[in-house]
Image (cartoon, rainbow, N blue to C red):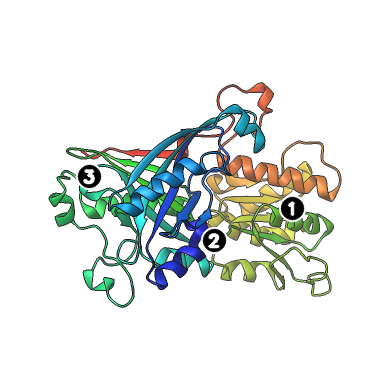
Amino acid sequence: MLELSAEISARLARGERFALATVTAVTGSAPRDPGASMIVDPDGRITGSVSGGCVEGAVYELCERVLDGEGVEHGRFGIDDESAFAVGLGCGGEIDVFVQPAAPGLLDREPFDRVLEGESSGIATLVAGPAALLGRVVVPGRNGNDPRDAGSSGRLPGLDDGELAAAGVHGISAARIDAELDRNVRSGRSGLVRLECDGDDLVFFCESRLTPPRMVIFGAVAFAEALSSAAALLGYRVSVCDHRPAFATAERFPAAHEVVAQRPVAYLARLDVDERTVVCVLSHDARTEVPLLRLALSLPVAYVGALGSRRTHEERVELLRAAGATAAELARLRSPIGLDLGAVTPEETAVSILAEVIAVRSGRDARPLSATIGPIHATADREAVVGVS
């Protein structure tokens, strides 16, 4: 539903009531991913789509039923092969859709406004469990569950233990639920989260929208120009840094969000990095790179790579070891950078680097698909099962 943040926030601000349909699970091929949403208002107007047109009619009927009553609706719809082919898929699949009433007092504007402000955001809806709680919306990780937050700010109170007990939920606390949902949001995953408890298990559809991951490129060289353009296409927020002002110019790196002429170590030290940040050192000078790589390898980033030959790599490792880098830190260094694709040009090298970044991020070994078996796309992230003792 976060994809319709602007529409939902505006409707809630106007005090409107509407039905909100959201894809919560996908089996096989389907036109849209979990989180795809559609709004139907009391006048029958439609905003958004859950399937690109394949099952909108049936979902519309569920929305009408929700608007006529006070409950929620579930639907499982098959996408036949002909419909799937029409939207560019080789074969059909199934989608699960959850339809809930939406209005001020049922939905909180905060997660939608955070998306509109370019911030990370998450929201979770109970889609299976005790009937009294179905459709209950939670904003994971928000500080405080004071019911007074539901005043003029429009913030709804979080789940509390009394609400759970009244619905017959035992063996799990509201704090534990919030912690698990918040962990899922911070991971960037959108999907079903099943929480085991005494009685009916609780199944939330948890949707996460993170700010774009950051790629920091050091060295204003031709390889950096190609890499910044390719990385921006993949959704990275790209920064390019070089200590030489004549080379570090916005004109040379039009795809970069930030181009900085500064000492690389000083620039990296002041950056706000996280576990999704990618650091690529392309300056090709082992001796001057050592302080920068030493710092990068000590940070909780996703990837650290450095350009250079195997001989340069050996010299680089020895210098890093002498500078105090641990064996664990050196094992994180991707050098020579990129996958062995036979890349020669800067553009090909950019593909090689990004292919390795994707492989590291997804935990894959980058073998050809023709040499592997099993699902092409990972499915483990779609549902997390949390056992409570």
| Amino acid type, callout 1 | Ala
Residue 258 vs 285, above or below: the answer is below
Which SS class for mark 2? loop
311, above or below 119, in the image? above
376 vs 365, nearest the viewer: 376
User: Which quadrant of the structure image shows residue 217?
Assistant: bottom right
Residue wearing tag 2: 211
Disc 1 to disc 3, C-alpha distance: 48 Å
Q: Quadrant of the C terminus?
A: top left
Residue 111 image point, x, y percent: 42, 63
- Binning the other alpha carbons within 10 Å of mark 2 as few (below 14), some (14 to 19) or many (20 upward) gives some
Amino acid carrying mark 2 in the image:
Thr
**Quarter of image, res 227:** bottom right
SS label for mark 3: helix
x, y (%) of residue 83?
Answer: 60, 33
Q: Earlier in the sequence, mark 2 or mark 1?
A: 2
In the rendered structure, which disc, 3 or 2, sits on the residue that comes first in sequence?
A: 3
Q: Which of the numbered marks, if any, corresponds to residue 131?
A: 3
In depth, the one of 388 and 97 nearer the eye is: 97
Picture residue at 33% right of the left edge, 75% below the top: 153
Residue for point 45% across, 44% down: 59
Above or below for 198 versus 71: above
Left or right of 349? Residue 206 is: left
10 Å crowding of disc 3: few (<14), some (14-19), many (20+): some
319 sits left or right of 188 in the view: right
Q: Give the residue drawn at x 59%, y 30%.
A: 376
Left or right placement of residue 308 versus residue 52 in this view: right
Q: Secondary structure at mark 1?
A: helix
Q: Position of residue 269 (x, y in %)?
A: 58, 68
